[in-house]
Image (tube, rainbow, N blue to C red):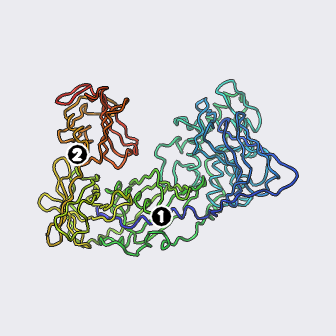
Amino acid sequence: MKIYKLRNWLVILSVLVLASCLGDDDDDNTTTPDQTAQTTEIKVSPALGLTKNATVRLILLANNTPIEGATGNTGETGVATITLNSAIAEPFIVEVLGGADAEYFDEAKGTFLALPADTTLRAVLSAFKSEVGVTTLTEIAATAIINTGATSAEAVNLVNEQVRTALAPALTDITAPPQLIDAASGVTASDDQAGIYAVSLAALAQLGSSSSSPALAIVDALRADFLDLTIDGKVGDQAFESPLYNASTFISEYTSAIQAYAQQVGLTTDLNTTFSLDNIKKTLEGLNDIFASLDLGSLDLDFVPGGLSPGSGGDNSGNDGEGNTLTITGSSTVAGVTTEIPPITINNVPAPDPNDLETIKKQIEDSFVQQQLTVNDLAFELVSSSDTKIVVSVRYSVTTQGVTVSSDLTYTWTLTGKDDDDDDMDDDVMLPEVLKGKSFVMVFNLTQSGSSYADGQKVKFTFSSSGMLFIDTDPEANNGDEMSLDDVMMEGTEYVYKDEQSGFVYRVSVTPTGLNEINLFTMEKVLLGSFVAEGVTNLALVTARAGEYTVTGAGHSRGTVIIGSDGTIDFDTGTSFAPSDIVAIFDRTNLEQEKRIQINYGADDSGPLINLFLSTDASAITSIQYRISSENVDVMVTVEGTVTGGGGG
C-alpha cells in the first residue's frame, strides 16, 4: 500500500473548533423577562426516576441565553419550583444539571445513583406551562431541536410530537411530568398519563441494564442513535462499538420491558391498549425538512490562526496530497449544545500514515499547545485503511477562554493512489523496536561550528512506528516539534535522515537495548557534533537492585520482572525499557509510606512509569508497578522472590 504522509493537516482540527462555535452568538448577557407585578411559578420534575438535588435553569431557545434568576433545585422531593416575574412568551429550554449531591433513582438497578456533573437533561417547550417533565424522551427531542438550530414554536412542537409518536404513543405530551419512581418495591403506578409515562421511562432504562448507570446510558445511546431519525444502532455509518440494545429487535425488547415493569407496579389491565404497544416504532417521521435546514455557513480556511488553506503549500516532502479528498463529518458540543456538522469536503489534503497515529496524536496536542489551547481526552484512531480510502475517528475537547468545545468527528480521505515522492527513500527500511514510537531527550556535544545547535543544547527526538523522525529543539518550552523528517535510509548499521532544506544529515546509532547516539553531519559528511543521552540522576538506585524477580499479579503474563545491570527494566513480555528511555528517576526512599523508586519514561507522571516499591527499611523490592495514567494502564505485581541477584520481599 502506498504511504500518504501528513503535513500541515492540523488546520482541519482548528477549522472544526471554529465551526463548532458557529451559530453561537457568543453573547453571555442574561435576559430578564418583562417585569410585572404578578409572579408566575414553574414546577420542574426531572425523571430518570426521582431526581434529587439537581440544579435546574431556564434558557431562551432563540439565543441560548439563560434567563436571569430562573434557577432552582429539585432538593429531596425531586421537584424544583422556579418563580418568574412573568410567564415566558417564547420557546425555551428547561435544563437539568448533575453534580454535587445530585442523584437519581435508576429503575433498572433499583437504587439511587449519582447524577454526574457532566450530565445534562433538557426539555424544549414551545410555550410556557406551569408543570414540566424532563426525561429521556424530552432529551432526545431537545437534541434534535438544538442540532437543527430550529427556534420556532412550530418546529419545537413537531419534534416533540414525533418523539412522542415513536416511543410513547399512549402519551399526549412528553413535556408533562411523569410519576416519580423512588423505590424498587412497594410502588404502584397511577393509572393515568403520569403513570404510563413513568412505566415507559422505566422500560427504556431496562434496555440499558448492562451499564453501570442504565438510565443515563440509554439517554446517551438513544439521543445519538436518533440523530439520523432512525434507531439503527449507528451514528451516521458508524455502528456503536458496545451497543446497549439490538437495533433490529428494539421494538420487541422495549414493548416487553413495558409489559414486565407495568405488571411489577400494578398496571395489568389491557396493556396493549393502555400503552398503544402496536403503534411504537423506531423512526422519527416528518423531520427531514427541519434537519436539512441545518447550516453552519461557509468556512474560510485562510483565516484559521497558524493554519494553511488547502493547497497553499508549506510541504516540502514531495507529498502535497494532490488529488486526495478529505471529507469531515461528526458533531461538536459547546456549553452542552450538540451541533451536527454538515459534511466538509477539502481537496488536495495529505492523508495520514496509518502506522503513525500515535505520533499524529502528539502533533495534534503540540499544535493546540502552540495555539495556547488546552486539549483533553484526545483520541485519534484508525477505523479502516486501504489503497483507496483511509478513515480515522477523531475525538477531543478543547478549552479556550473558559469555553470547552467537544468534537466527535470522522475523517475520510479518498486517495488517488498517486505517490509524488521523488526522493530515494527506501520504503522497506523499518526502524528497530528500540526506536519505534519512542522519544529521547539528548544533549548536543559540539565538535565543529556550522550547525544550528549550541553546545549543551537539549533536543528531543521522537521516532514514529513508520520511520518518521520528529525533532523538538526546545523540549522544555513545551511548544511542540520544530521539524520532522520522513526519509529514513540504512547505511551500514545506522539509520540516516537527511534535512535537505538545512543541509544536515542525522545518523542514528542503536544498541540492542536502546539508542546509542545521533551524529550530525553536513551533506559533505563533515561531523558537526553528536547528540548523546542526557545523564540520568539516581540511575544507581535502579542498577543496585539488578536481578530477576519472580512476581504475581493480575495483568502480568510472564511471572518475572528483570532489572538489568545497566538500568534496563524488562517488566513483562512486550513491555521493556532501556536506560535511554528514562526521562527521570525520583528517589522516594525517604517517605514514611510507600517508599519507592519512581522511574519516569514520559514527560510527566501521566506517561509511562515504573515504581519499585520497597520494604520499610528500603532494603528489598516488595512490589513493582507499571502505569500509564493517560491510557488507564495500571499493572501491580507482588515480588515473591528472586531468581538471580536483587532482593525480594
| Residue in the foreground of this view, choosing between 285 and 173 | 173
Q: Secondary structure at mark 2?
A: loop
Along the polypeptide, which appears first: circle 1 or circle 2?
A: 1
Task: Quickly name the residue at label 2.
Answer: 578
Can residue 272 be seen in the rendering of this structure? no
Above or below, 525 against 372 in this view is: below
Q: Which image quadrant: the C terminus?
A: top left
User: Residue 181 falls in which quadrant of the image?
Assistant: top right
Horizontal and vertical percent position of residue 117: 58, 43
Q: Which image quadrant: the N terminus?
A: bottom left
Q: Dot 2 surroundings within 10 Å: few (below 14), some, or many (20 or more)? A: some
Q: Is residue 126 left or right of residue 422?
A: right
Looking at the image, the residue that sits furthest to the front is: 590
User: Residue 229 falls in which quadrant of the image?
Assistant: bottom right
The number of numbered badges drawn on the structure is: 2
In this view, the mark in front (1 or 2): 2
Horizontal and vertical percent position of residue 354: 34, 57
Horizontal and vertical percent position of residue 48: 65, 38
| Residue in the foreground of this view, choosing between 247 and 108 | 108
Q: Is residue 613 left or right of residue 271?
A: left
Q: Is residue 20 left or right of residue 477?
A: right
User: Residue 171 falls in which quadrant of the image?
Assistant: top right
Residue type at the position of mark 2: Ala
Query: Do the CB atoms of the residues marked 1 and 2 lie less than 8 Å apart?
Result: no
Q: Is residue 147 left or right of residue 575?
A: right
Task: Quickly name the residue at label 1.
Answer: 14
Q: Secondary structure at mark 1?
A: helix
